[in-house]
């Protein structure tokens, strides 16, 4: 079974703090993704990575950065947290093998910025 | 611009009846489509997918239909069960492209017992 694990289920941070969200997958997947889910807006892609040290911006990268130093780990960094970054953050991974493949998600991190 | 749209934010269906969830897309380069189910405070779980070379894919109570000319897909759940109550997201991808998945805004399904 594919397992995608996010380091925290719930986080509360103060405005201006630097925040790290960690994600680890155990299936040797090449692709990893960070999404945020907000009511009425669905899942929006923040960043994704298709290889170690490779990253591409998604639809809403402003205020975020990412790091992928090892294949199994993909970190999302909020450089200076703001209240509009309060959201559910979802990490996912997928394989490049085969053309049709689904993404597997972690359990999510509910981040509240106060 | 919203490339994947789910125009119905919510849907209520009686237990045992059919649930039909709809999704439209704008980018004709998409060639792989997926449906995910999400419960509150959990990550989305994969439900069913369809490649653009097909127009139908079935898995138990779940069937996905794809109409490429209309850029429309739908998920049918028959019969609907109370445990199906969740938010359903459709997603699209270019399997031969950058592998990223674009999601719709979701439809909240409530199956009434």
Image: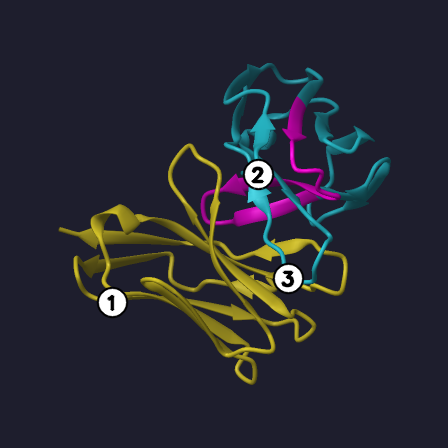
Chain colours: A cyan, B yellow
- Name the residue beneath numbered marker 2: A2
Chain letter for the residue marked with disc 3 in the picture: A
Q: Secondary structure at mark 3?
A: loop
Q: Which residues are magenta?
A: A21-46
The image quarter containing residue B109 is bottom left
- Name the residue beneath numbered marker 3: A100
- B46 left or right, relative to A102: left
Q: Residue at x 38, y 56 (%)?
A: B9
- How far apart are the two marked residues, 2 and 3, measured between alpha carbons? 16 Å
Dot 1, crowdedness within 10 Å: few (<14), some or many (≥20)? some
- Asked if the stretch drawn in magenta spans residue A80, the answer is no
Q: Position of residue A67 (x, y in %)?
A: 79, 30
Q: Residue at x 61, y 64 (%)?
A: B3
Q: Position of residue B4 (x, y in %)?
A: 56, 63
Question: Which label belongs to residue B18?
Answer: 1
Dominant SS type (magenta) = strand
Q: Residue at x 45, y 43 (%)?
A: A39
Farthest right residue in view:
A53
Q: Secondary structure at mark 1?
A: loop
Q: Are marks 3 and 1 on the same chain?
A: no
Q: Nearer the viewer, residue B25 or B35?
A: B35
Q: Nearer the viewer, mark 2 or mark 1?
A: 2
């Amino acid at each position: 079974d594919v397992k995608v694990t996010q380091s925290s289920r719930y986080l509360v941070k103060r405005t201006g703090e630097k925040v790290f969200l960690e994600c680890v997958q155990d299936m040797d997947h090449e692709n990893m993704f960070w999404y945020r889910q907000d009511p009425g807006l669905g899942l929006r892609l923040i960043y994704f990575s298709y290889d170690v040290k490779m990253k591409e911006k998604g639809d809403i990268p402003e205020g975020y950065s990412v790091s992928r130093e090892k294949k199994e780990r993909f970190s999302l960094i909020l450089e200076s947290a703001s209240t509009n970054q309060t959201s559910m953050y979802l990490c996912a991974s997928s394989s490049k093998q085969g053309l049709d493949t689904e993404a597997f998600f972690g359990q999510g991190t509910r981040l509240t910025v106060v | 611009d919203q490339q994947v749209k789910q125009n119905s934010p919510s849907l209520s269906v009686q237990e045992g009846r059919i649930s039909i969830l709809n999704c439209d897309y704008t980018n004709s380069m998409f060639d792989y489509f997926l449906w995910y189910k999400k419960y509150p405070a959990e990550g989305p779980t994969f439900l069913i997918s369809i490649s653009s070379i097909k127009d139908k894919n079935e898995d138990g109570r779940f069937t996905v239909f794809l109409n490429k000319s209309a850029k429309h897909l739908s998920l049918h759940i028959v019969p609907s069960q109370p445990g199906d109550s969740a938010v359903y997201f459709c997603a699209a991808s270019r399997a031969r492209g950058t592998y990223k998945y674009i999601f719709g805004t979701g439809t909240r399904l409530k199956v009434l017992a």
